[in-house]
Amino acid sequence: MSDYRAPTKDISFVINELADLNAISQLPGFEEATTDLAEAILDECARFAGEVIAPLNRVGDTEGCKLGPDGVVTATGWTAAYKAFCEAGWNGMTFPADFGGQALPNVLGTAVKEMMASANLSFSLCSMLTGGAIEALRTCASEELKATYLEKMVTGEWTGTMNLTEPQAGSDLALIRSRAEPQPDGSYRIFGQKIFITYGDHDMTDNIVHLVLARLPDAPPGVKGISLFLVPKFLVNADGSLGERNDAHCVSIEHKLGIHASPTCVLAFGDNGGAVGYLLGEENHGLRYMFVMMNEARLGVGLQGLALGERSYQQALAFARERKQGRDAVTGEALVTIDRHPDIRRMLMTMKSRVEAGRAVAYITSALLDRAHASADAAEKERNLFLAEFLIPIVKGGSTEMSIDVTSLGVQIHGGMGFIEETGAAQHWRDSRITTIYEGTTGIQANDLIFRKLMRDQGATARLFFDEIAGTVRQLKGANRAELQAIGRRLESALQAWVEATEWVIANTRTGVSGVLAGAVAYLDLAVAVCGGWQMGRAALIAAGHLDKQEGDQVFYRGKIATAFFYADQLLPLAAAHAETVKAGDAALATMPDEAF
Amino acid sequence: MSDYRAPTKDISFVINELADLNAISQLPGFEEATTDLAEAILDECARFAGEVIAPLNRVGDTEGCKLGPDGVVTATGWTAAYKAFCEAGWNGMTFPADFGGQALPNVLGTAVKEMMASANLSFSLCSMLTGGAIEALRTCASEELKATYLEKMVTGEWTGTMNLTEPQAGSDLALIRSRAEPQPDGSYRIFGQKIFITYGDHDMTDNIVHLVLARLPDAPPGVKGISLFLVPKFLVNADGSLGERNDAHCVSIEHKLGIHASPTCVLAFGDNGGAVGYLLGEENHGLRYMFVMMNEARLGVGLQGLALGERSYQQALAFARERKQGRDAVTGEALVTIDRHPDIRRMLMTMKSRVEAGRAVAYITSALLDRAHASADAAEKERNLFLAEFLIPIVKGGSTEMSIDVTSLGVQIHGGMGFIEETGAAQHWRDSRITTIYEGTTGIQANDLIFRKLMRDQGATARLFFDEIAGTVRQLKGANRAELQAIGRRLESALQAWVEATEWVIANTRTGVSGVLAGAVAYLDLAVAVCGGWQMGRAALIAAGHLDKQEGDQVFYRGKIATAFFYADQLLPLAAAHAETVKAGDAALATMPDEAF
């Protein structure tokens, strides 16, 4: 069993020094987001996540949730914890004050999301899904629907769900068959079955607001014929009180590998005459609205990846500091704690450095979104939005794949105990396994990175990153510390590999798309390695500055430089290998006969 | 749910063409092991594994096993399947005819082990452990003990266990506390608790033969004071019938992440006066006997890794050939099966190529052991033994780490369905997670590779491999097919990386052991990549020879070349990155303050 202590020191470093919260708080609307307020929020959230939410993580894994006659029953402690979560205001932190939110920057919301996901991924999913639904309503709901639903969702009194998947329509939403029939009163009746609906039903709130993709009778086929509807679990009367039970029911829940306490529902709409739904935005534009939210949802899942990595790291470190086995290979001292063994240290440092790199890139992305949202200058707005959107598949694909590897190391460090469920290390690994799948698989992230984010401006945004990273390389190589110079050399080679692979991809996307597709995930891996190395390099430079001035927490800054150095030595050499694989294209795949698989 | 069809075509190719069964059947004692007999065995074992054992895999995962008042109760169908397994003679295939075995070469036994582990890892463990115990008895038991126990274990009428681990003694066996008190009749009384005992109790046979590490009263401390004892569950009367119940009891079983159907027991010895035990071999030499068996046990666990990879690959392939999502990116054809998407093909080929590379290296190792055991020439014997022993940590470490990655891809290819337990893909991933831990963690394999296998002859055995691989490179580069030349170039670079890293390791083992230890797993990864590429290169050359002569299964040989080419493009570039990491040593680790973790 592990305790969770939020890594507020590193989060604070990332928010203030890498993401420059001070600059964000100069933007219109974010004036209140001072460093002091940020520290207060981090401390309070750390306490809440560690004391209230984290202890339920194992309970939830063991009990799971159950489908009873009145719907889904969550695990022991869930409803009380959810109530406390909402009352403390964590649900609405980044939403507008008009609807009961606190209008704080995303970069602070990101810290709250990370801590909640580390404490208890299953628990945190409910609020994450509600947040996505809120974004959708803000984007495309009528004023009337906003007035009826938004505030209750921002406070968390009602939760939200996203209903995309159907048995035949997973990654390919063109295949959606659920249908919506217009009614004389302007509402619709919704019919169809949706699967994999997270918190599709539960007992924590009085009402649930389902957002549902479905087709109108005259809709064109494919993705251009999908509309988005709001379907409440209970209809809402004109005075805001709850009315009739709607024809939307959970008919079963899945038995899953992980996130046992998060109910994954099959929802049946319209089995008894039709579920009442309300059109959101324009007809047949449903997918566009979904994609508006998708970027933030993907960033959220990327955060989950690093959150699980952090939790697993903390548990492995605590174990390694207590468990005694073997002699110290250098001093010969008998029976030392295993954190003294170089291979265990390597694993711990791999976990730590990958988590910190992932954290830095995720928070930077989130800060770019804040700049994009709040900046008054249109060109600045667009530039920041493009930069953020470029990084989002890197955060989502990179940190989720990382989490599988890192939580696996967490199991490994425990040895045989890691394989025993009571230890708790295995749960993080099992929970991590969904993160590379939902909100778009890693393959989909890689395609998004290349075909949307890289190619939409023929590499112009990518080149902005290359220039920034080259600047960091120059600073590192010119620094007066050997470690920084070493990091600079590794980062320079890795950047070079990324630049070359990018040129290859841009050239080949025009001529041989199948070769690019075959190497897309390798291209994503490459971008992930370099972006992580870049942020770790920046972090090392900042840490060195503080050390030179002998200010702040010296151990933390020395640790930051060592962690960046380790990342450079261990992770950055992979960049060249990934570039080789990208440039190999589908030469080998193309020679493979189908029937030889 | 997946069916398992043993890959007899590839296994047969590996046994006959890569491992040269024909040459082995020329060695004294192996005359019966002809190609024809091998084919008959492969076909029959494939049928048995697919029809009898594989269908129990999911049942076992769901039911697990239970500890009742009379001991452990295995899952439905287990006892009948075990009986059928023994009656068919699979348990004793490679053991001497004197004790009821069939005295066939290891390389054939390896095929049987692979198929059984693919079909049902939990089930196969019982026989694997019995095999280890048989080897131990053959090495160090008195003639009397051999006469009493061996034949019944070879036929499978009784099973065997290995009792090493205690709560405080995992990887570090020096910490063992179980004790043995000599009795006037020459027997011993054993006291102590052992944990993680696979099939420590079960209901499939009348008796179980526990091999137990314990200390004599006057034993020196540490690993030089450990003796090995035989402790039967039921004592055996002079006439071979079962006598009294011995004082060795299963007191609990673990709740594990995977291999649910394999009982992992806590065994209490001597809680009621002492368990009767018999000394095996000399006093205080227990660990040496264990290490004799360890090599083969580790090879066995490596096989488990590739077996799980194979099973997961088959299931993912079947799913990808049926599941329809999305358009063909090249032809634009609507709604194709997902095996047409380049990224899915990449994942399938990654699975296939890594499994086939792992298989080739494992079977080669097993054939080297056959040559070592059967060769009449002492120098030849030692040479083959050294080569095999060098490869064993590569097989164990490499194929088990591979299995975690490959079964994870198996989950990924299933998308959301992969996360649902009923699909069955997740079980392979969960089951795989123990393989990098038991019989020595990956870190321990890496240390074994460097400090025992590489350094015991200052790299002489390693250089034999380098010469062999260089020969394969020359053949590939001189071949008349572009794919073979491409494989040759990749293998040449990878070999160069291995050679350089080896030189660095040899030089630094003498001076800075902590830097070598920090990069030991990277060195192992490097060796794994190159050895896999070497065998795939050999396989491609052989396949090309058959294609040139237009003989045999043309699709299989074209597929083999494509698979080797893919491995070269995707896996071999990693060799250079691993070499960089090895040579980076502990430069970064050394700068990390303890308190900054």
Image (spheres, coloured by chain):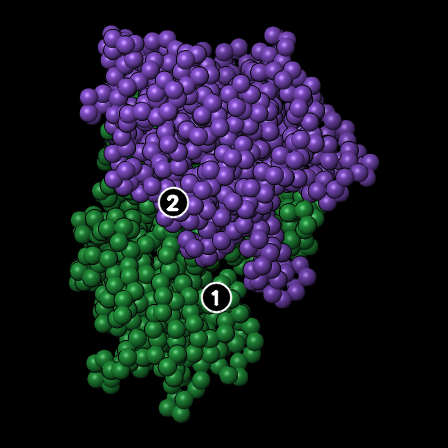
Chain colours: A purple, B green
Q: Residue at 55% across / 55% down in the picture?
A: A319
- Pointers 2 and 1 in contact (CB under 8 A)? no
Q: Residue at 82% across / 36% down in the picture?
A: A549
Quarter of the figure that contains the C terminus of chain A: top left
The reply to whether residue B340 is in sight is no
Residue B375 placement (x, y as % from top left)? 37, 62
Density class for disc 2 (Cα within 10 Å; few <14, some 14-19, many ≥20) is many
* Chain letter for mark 2: A
Relative to B11, is B217 above or below? below
| Residue B145: quadrant of the picture | bottom left
Q: Amino acid at mark 2?
A: Ala
Q: Nearer the viewer, residue A103 or B278?
A: A103
Q: Nearer the viewer, residue A590 or B225?
A: B225
Q: Residue furthest bottom?
A: B184
* Chain letter for mark 1: B
Label 2 to label 1: alpha-carbon separation? 32 Å
Q: Which residue is mark 2?
A: A75
Relative to B136, is B171 above or below? above
Q: Which residue is mark 1?
A: B167
Q: Residue at 30% across / 67% down in the picture?
A: B201
**SS of the residue at dot 2?**
loop
Q: Nearer the viewer, residue B427 or B279?
A: B427
Q: Residue furthest front?
A: A239
Residue B474 placement (x, y as % from top left)? 46, 36
Q: Residue at 76% across / 39% down in the picture?
A: A552
Q: Nearer the viewer, residue B322 or A226?
A: A226
The reply to whether residue B223 is in sight is yes
Q: Amino acid at mark 1?
A: Pro
Density class for disc 1 (Cα within 10 Å; few <14, some 14-19, many ≥20) is some
Mark whose residue sits in front, 2 or 1: 2
